[in-house]
């Protein structure tokens, strides 16, 4: 039967039109209409012409055929959307409860007029001596951008211009003098410019440079084993999800590149997701050195035009590897063979705008649609992923040792802050940390000081015993509010600030949270000769600031880098030999069942920063709770120990992955309506799903309760069966009450 009816999504982001409408395809258009075709159709009362996208074709009409309207025309010049991407959008809309229009916007690049340019490459035209001389000169004159370019060129021999512009601040003004003096040239990419050997390994030798730096590494035994496992599946045509669990510095990136080069040999493409914060110049260059200009980069800085250009380059075969944050997942590769998600535990893989998708989950769907493999990598895998590996859903690959010979894990010192106080040290620097920091300053080695503060609000803790004030009903600490009251964001429990510590009776209670700014001040007072850099939400608000700070530290412009968790993610600073965690407990008491997991992860990642180079390192973890398993297993760098304890806790407390957890978030400008709607939703769930007996918690105020004048409430529903939870989530979104009486209340859900 001929499929002459088309399901069309009208390109509007309004709740009520968020569905497909069926149209008849007029005969003359039938050969050209496929899934993904963009069309104009008459819509609504006045039959206004609207743009739409075909998402499905069928032979059977949904109404009496006479009642169906006809497609008016095909959009001129419109690129036909890859039907797979469309199917992916459908899946996302369904799974995350967004509108189709929102899902499409996530999956498809915003179309703009672009000319897809060839990549240009900066190539050194002289020898090391002259470049070194120029570098010394640029440094003397404090020409930072020039020095940066010269240094990178000395290290790499050639650089993609696009990357240098983005990450090193190489503007044309910086480059021009070098071009004029023929010290460098700017070449347009053609095959072989990157000197790729047939096996895909890079060779980017600079005149007079020893080939030592660019030589292909011999994989370690563990790396080989991981690669071999993947290859034996791959050659047999088996596509799976792998969890590559490898300690920091164990050579995961090297393994990724090995897998990619195999997939590329078959003419397939690969996507590499890396959290934006870890997408540094050094990381990206490693891929360029190996794969040359077959690499494309996405990041949030790109304009819509640049993003579209990258998409086009992916679609037309100019590039075969797309590296980027979450959104790189939607690179329109025609023959995708492999998706890699590095640092898979990162919360950045969870979208915060609708559709609130989990990139790991969507990657799984996209991979299976393409018969591609998926590799999740981490030094601290998320509890869910490790759980799945344990059940056999994922294949576990492990790297237990650092890859570089001579590079060892740092020595970890746990300092009990209660003892420090008892022995008269009131400073936020323990004596051990002060001693080691002095030593590093003497040796001209670098230190990172890390304040692992998360979230917006702080908790209250006792300065004498370190106890945080907790909710009597939940295993979370209470949040301190400006009005002086303490609240639980899980169940809504509330109490005034107590006079004394409920554990030890001490009157010294205070909202915790010395900021990084304060820490900088104290550090400068204590070590007046040290050069200090600070990196946090404030200092990186400006575009490009975060790269600049990291680059400056990398280049040795400071002795101490102070920062929030953004400094511990994946950066490789060979001269850092000391890492100080100022207060390990800070992330332990956030109102979230994942607080122990986050703490373990932050502490482990922080510890992994020390001693990355040839020098050995130390880590000082200052804490009030040295015995908490998240702290002690991080100090021992023992993921297995942490995982077993944490899973037990999740099982007892009934949190994911032990059970499914659905959260329903309701929000409205009208506080009263919101309260009513939340109660109604609760009643409806109890009534409709009485037989399934889900455990419902709440409604409670979300933290923070009011954002941009919108009030927010949340309900948690626990059940073993994910399908039932998904059904509950959808029933809430589709409920008549929310569409009518409470149409000013919006609802969304998350299923973990
Ligand atoms: P991870 O991604 O697990 O943190 P990387 O891939 O960044 O680890 O490797 C850490 C360091 O070890 C890098 O400097 C890398 O060049 C080096 N390295 C990786 N594999 C090898 C190997 N087989 N032989 C020598 N050095 C290696
Ligand atoms: Zn106390
Ligand atoms: Zn509570």
Image (cartoon, rainbow, N blue to C red):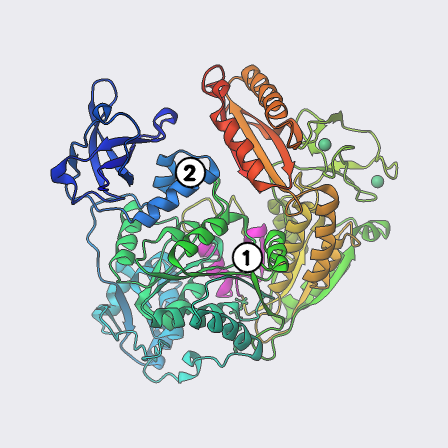
Classify mark 2 as within 8 Å of ligand 3 or not, answering yes or no.
Answer: no
On the question of residue 586 being in view, the answer is yes
Q: What x and y, as percent, mark residue 368?
A: 43, 55
* Element at label 2: helix
Q: Nearer the viewer, residue 590 or 233?
A: 233
Q: Nearer the viewer, residue 58 or 407?
A: 58
Residue 569's disc is 1
On-image quarter of the N terminus? top left
Per the image, is 561 magenta? yes
Per the image, is 504 magenta? no
Identify the residue at horizontal 48%, vertical 54% (top origin).
275
Q: Nearer the viewer, residue 488 or 329?
A: 329
The magenta segment is 546-572
Dot 1: few (<14), some (14–19), or many (≥20) neighbours within 10 Å?
A: some
Classify residue 366 as left or right of residue 388.
left
The residue indicated by pointer 2 is 93
Marked residue nearer the N-terminal end (1 or 2): 2
Considering every residue shown, the one lying at the far front of the view is 1
């Amino acid at each position: 039967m001929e499929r002459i009816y088309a399901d069309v999504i009208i390109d509007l982001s309004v709740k009520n039109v968020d569905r497909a409408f069926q149209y008849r395809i007029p005969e003359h258009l039938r050969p050209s209409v496929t899934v993904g075709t963009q069309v104009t159709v008459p819509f609504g009362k006045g039959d206004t012409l609207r743009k739409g996208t075909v998402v499905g074709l069928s032979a059977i009409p949904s109404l009496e055929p006479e009642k169906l309207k006809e497609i008016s025309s095909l959009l001129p010049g419109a690129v036909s959307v890859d039907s797979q991407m469309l199917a992916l959008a459908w899946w996302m809309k369904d799974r995350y409860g967004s509108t189709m229009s929102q899902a499409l916007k996530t999956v498809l690049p915003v179309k703009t007029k672009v000319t897809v340019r060839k990549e240009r490459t900066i190539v050194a035209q002289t020898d090391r001596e002259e470049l070194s001389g120029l570098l010394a000169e640029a440094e003397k004159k404090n020409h930072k951008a020039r020095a940066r370019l010269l240094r990178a060129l000395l290290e790499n021999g050639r650089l993609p211009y696009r990357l240098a512009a983005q990450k090193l601040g190489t503007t044309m003004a910086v480059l021009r003098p070098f071009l004029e003096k023929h010290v460098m040239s700017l070449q347009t990419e053609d095959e072989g410019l990157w000197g790729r050997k047939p096996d895909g390994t890079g060779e980017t030798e600079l005149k007079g440079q020893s080939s030592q730096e660019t030589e292909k590494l011999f994989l370690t035994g563990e790396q080989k084993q991981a690669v071999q496992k993947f290859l034996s599946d791959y050659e047999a045509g088996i596509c799976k999800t792998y969890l590559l669990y490898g300690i920091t510095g164990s050579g995961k990136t090297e393994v990724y590149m090995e897998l990619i080069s195999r997939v590329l040999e078959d003419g397939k493409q690969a996507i590499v997701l890396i959290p934006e914060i870890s997408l540094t110049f050094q990381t990206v260059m490693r891929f360029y050195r190996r794969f040359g200009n077959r690499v494309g980069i996405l990041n949030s800085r790109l304009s819509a035009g640049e993003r579209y250009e990258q998409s086009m380059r992916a679609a037309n075969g100019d590039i075969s590897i797309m590296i980027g944050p979450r959104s790189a997942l939607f690179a329109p590769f025609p023959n995708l063979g492999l998706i890699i998600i590095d640092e898979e535990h990162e919360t950045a893989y969870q979208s915060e705008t609708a559709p609130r998708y989990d990139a790991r989950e969507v990657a799984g769907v996209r991979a299976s649609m393409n018969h591609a493999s998926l590799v999740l990598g981490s030094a601290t895998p998320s509890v869910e992923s490790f759980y799945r590996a344990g059940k056999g859903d994922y294949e576990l690959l492990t790297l237990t040792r650092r890859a570089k010979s001579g590079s060892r894990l740092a020595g970890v010192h746990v300092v009990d802050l209660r003892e420090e106080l008892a022995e008269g040290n009131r400073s936020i620097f323990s004596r051990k940390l002060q001693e080691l920091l002095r030593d590093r300053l003497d040796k001209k080695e670098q230190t990172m000081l890390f304040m692992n503060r998360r979230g917006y609000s702080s908790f209250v803790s006792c300065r004498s015993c370190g106890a945080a004030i907790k909710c009597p009903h939940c295993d979370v600490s209470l949040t301190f509010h400006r009005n002086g009251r303490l609240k639980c964001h899980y169940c809504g429990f509330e109490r005034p600030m107590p006079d004394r510590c409920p554990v030890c009776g001490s009157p010294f209670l205070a909202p915790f949270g010395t900021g990084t700014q304060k820490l900088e001040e104290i550090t400068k007072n204590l070590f007046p000769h040290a050069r200090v850099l600070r990196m946090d939400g404030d200092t990186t608000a400006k575009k490009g600031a975060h790269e600049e700070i990291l680059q400056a530290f990398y280049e040795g412009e400071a002795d101490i880098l102070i920062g929030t968790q953004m400094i511990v993610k994946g950066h490789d600073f060979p001269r850092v030999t000391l890492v100080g965690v100022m207060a390990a407990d800070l992330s332990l008491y956030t109102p979230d069942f994942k607080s122990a997991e986050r703490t373990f992860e932050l502490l482990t990642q922080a510890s992994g920063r020390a001693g990355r180079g040839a020098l050995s390192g130390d880590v000082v973890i200052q804490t009030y709770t040295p015995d908490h398993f998240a702290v002690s297993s991080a100090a021992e760098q023992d993921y297995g120990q942490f995982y077993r304890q944490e899973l037990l806790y999740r099982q007892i407390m009934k949190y994911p992955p032990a059970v499914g957890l659905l959260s329903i978030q309701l929000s409205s400008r009208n506080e009263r309506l919101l309260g009513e709607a939340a109660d109604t939703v609760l009643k409806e769930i109890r009534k409709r799903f009485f037989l399934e007996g889900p455990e419902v918690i709440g409604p409670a105020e979300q933290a923070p309760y009011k954002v941009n004048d919108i009030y927010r409430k949340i309900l948690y529903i626990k059940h073993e069966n994910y399908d039932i939870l998904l059904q509950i989530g959808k029933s809430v979104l589709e409920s008549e009450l929310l569409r009518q009486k409470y149409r000013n209340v919006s609802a969304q859900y998350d299923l973990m």
